Amino acid sequence: ICEEFRTGSGPSGSGGNPPPNTIHTWLERFNKQKPRSFEKATAPVDAEN
């Protein structure tokens, strides 16, 4: 997810990308809505590493 946001907000991304503040707000809302999803998503990655 982080990589997608970096490439999307980068100069190579398509025009009309939201500013960092908007992305931060969206991430905060998403974390508040589904914090468990993030925990489950990061758990397998940590286990693999």
Image: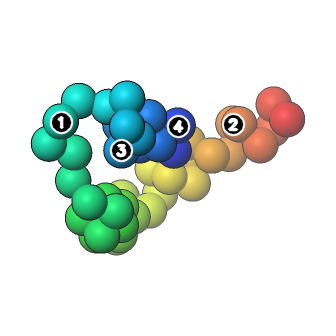
Question: The residue under label 4 is which amino acid type?
Answer: Glu
Asked if residue 21 shows in the view, the reply is yes
**Whole-Å distance between the Cαs marked 2 and 3?**
27 Å
Of badges 3 and 4, nearer the viewer stands: 3
Q: How is the image coloured?
A: rainbow
| Residue 48 x, y percent position in the rendering | 81, 31
Residues under numbered marks 4 and 1 in contact, where contact means CB atoms less than 8 Å apart? no
Mark 2 or 1: the one toward you: 1
Q: Is residue 47 left or right of residue 36?
A: right
Look at mark 1 in the image and give the residue it sits on. Answer: 15
Q: CA distance from mark 2 to mark 4?
A: 18 Å
**Comes first in the chain, label 4 or label 1:** 4
Neighbourhood count class around disc 4 (C-alpha, 10 Å): few under 14, some 14–19, many 20 upward: few
Residue 9's mark?
3
* Disc number for residue 44: 2
- Please indicate, yes or no, whether residue 1 appears anywhere in the rendered image: no
Label 1 sits on a secondary structure element that is loop
Q: Nearer the viewer, residue 12 or 29?
A: 12
* Mark 2 element type: helix
Q: For the residues labelled 3 and 4, say whether their Cβ atoms are less than 8 Å apart.
A: no
Q: CA distance from mark 4 to mark 1?
A: 18 Å
Q: Give the CA distance from mark 3 to mark 1.
A: 9 Å
